[in-house]
Image (cartoon, rainbow, N blue to C red):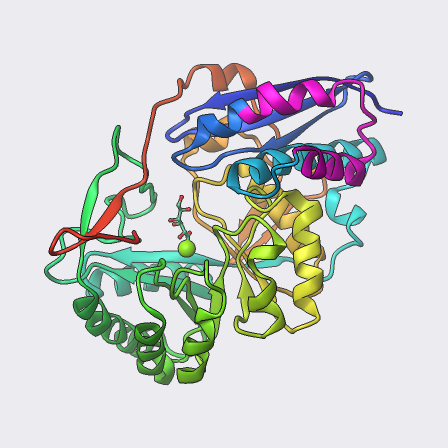
Amino acid sequence: MPKIVNARVIITSPGRNFVTLKIECDDGTTGVGDATLNGRELAVASYLADHVVPCLIGRDAHRIEDVWQYLYKGAYWRRGPVTMTAIAAVDTALWDIKGKLAGLPVYQLLGGASREAVTVYCHANGTSIDDTIAAALEYQQQGFRAIRLQCGVPGMASTYGVSKDRYFYEPADGDLPSESVWNTSRYLRIVPELFKAAREALGWDVHLLHDIHHRLTPIEAGRLGKDLEPYRPFWLEDATPAENQEAFKLIRQHTSAPLAVGEIFNSIWDAKDLIQNQLIDYIRATVVHAGGITHLRRIAAFADLYQVRTGCHGATDLSPVCMAAALHFDLSVPNFGIQEYMRHTPETDAVFPHAYSIEGGMMHPGDEPGLGVDIDEELAKGYEYKPAFLPVNRLEDGTMYSW
Ligand code: GCO
Ligand code: MG
């Protein structure tokens, strides 16, 4: 058996913070897992280093399911983003090790490829509609078949999804949380205009997506869905906070716009009612925050029974290790829908050398044994952790709101 002899938590900040777990076996085989929880990184690092690593030493690295159950049931305190991100890191690293020992890319261990490559959506954003459309046209020319559109809202200084840099998006930028101001009616007026302009400029052979980022009530989301229907959105994401899964019934009663949710979910239980009542069309949970490849497969298998497809979260705060793992999962899973793609900075790519590649709006995990991704620990040492918080949002009268 490949015995686990060492596991270390590596914190590095090549442009942004990442937490990575590296597990080592007695034969020298290593595996990596992403453990990054944006804005709360050190909580997961401590959970792993103080409470998980000591329990891993001496275990059989091949027993992925048993280790998963041991960490999940053994913690007694089930679920939650910190616990599930820590479990995900271990699980991902063990799949990487199993692939390397088998001499096969991980997607082969998951049943093999169900498609040639993975369709991704990219991000077009700008402070105005025109800027956003210009960015979208550029992506369309590069061959992307699915584009997310986010634009600034007139009268609001900043809004989620609109970056300072045209190519790199990084909302976690403050030593303390920065504050934005939110106005729902202005937002509800601009988004249909954005989609109208996008269809005129880009035509109908491209999928258009939009992220509401939890900022509407169910009835407001129903209204927006109706207004966007003529432009055939691919999905509306995080229409309303999903703690109350039943809230999505109200949205469904008012619009046929497809709904995606789940980037902040960490367990199948967050999505159970949404899926079995067919209240959503895409489940956005991903490897790093939803218990690793093992648990994500369980979510996808359950979703498949209800014709809900996958649409894994893939923002820049998920490291290339998570991206690689997500691609192996995406390539294999029968009910794959789409994969989010946001480019990492060259500094991040250098710290995490990887075999995955992108071409014409499609990605492939590569055919290296394991996940085909690693961390360059020497390079990583040069980038010290910097506290960075996500912004918060308030209504114009000062009331705290969802960001
Ligand atoms: C997305 C997400 C991200 C999150 C970010 C928070 O759809 O990509 O909403 O942009 O805001 O991952 O850390
Ligand atoms: Mg989102």
Q: Residue at x 69, y 63 (%)?
A: 302
* Along the viewing direction, whichever of 40 and 161 lies nearer the viewer: 40
Q: Is residue 56 left or right of residue 126?
A: right
* Percent coordinates x, y for residue 398 in the rendering: 14, 51
Instruction: Specify whether residue 50 is painted magenta.
Output: yes
Q: Position of residue 40 (x, y in %)?
A: 42, 33
Q: Residue furthest right?
A: 1
Which image quarter: residue 60? top right
Viewer-proximal residue, 255 or 112?
A: 255
Residue 122 drawn above or below residue 176: below
- Residue furthest to the front in view is 76
Magenta stretch: give its range: 47-75
Principal secondary structure, stretch drawn in magenta: helix
Q: Is residue 360 visible?
A: no
In the displayed structure, 336 sits above or below 400; it is below
Q: Is residue 238 left or right of residue 30?
A: left
Question: Per the image, is 273 magenta?
Answer: no
Q: Which residue lies at the image location 43% right of the left edge and 48% below the top edge?
A: 342
Q: Quadrant of the N terminus?
A: top right
Whether residue 340 sits left or right of residue 401 in the image: it is right
Residue at 77% across / 50% down in the picture? 110
Residue 323 position within the rendered picture, expressed as x and y whole percent measured from the top left: 56, 44
Vertical relation: 179 (above or below) 138? above
Count of residue discs: 0
- Measured as percent of width and height from the top left, residue 46 is found at 52, 22
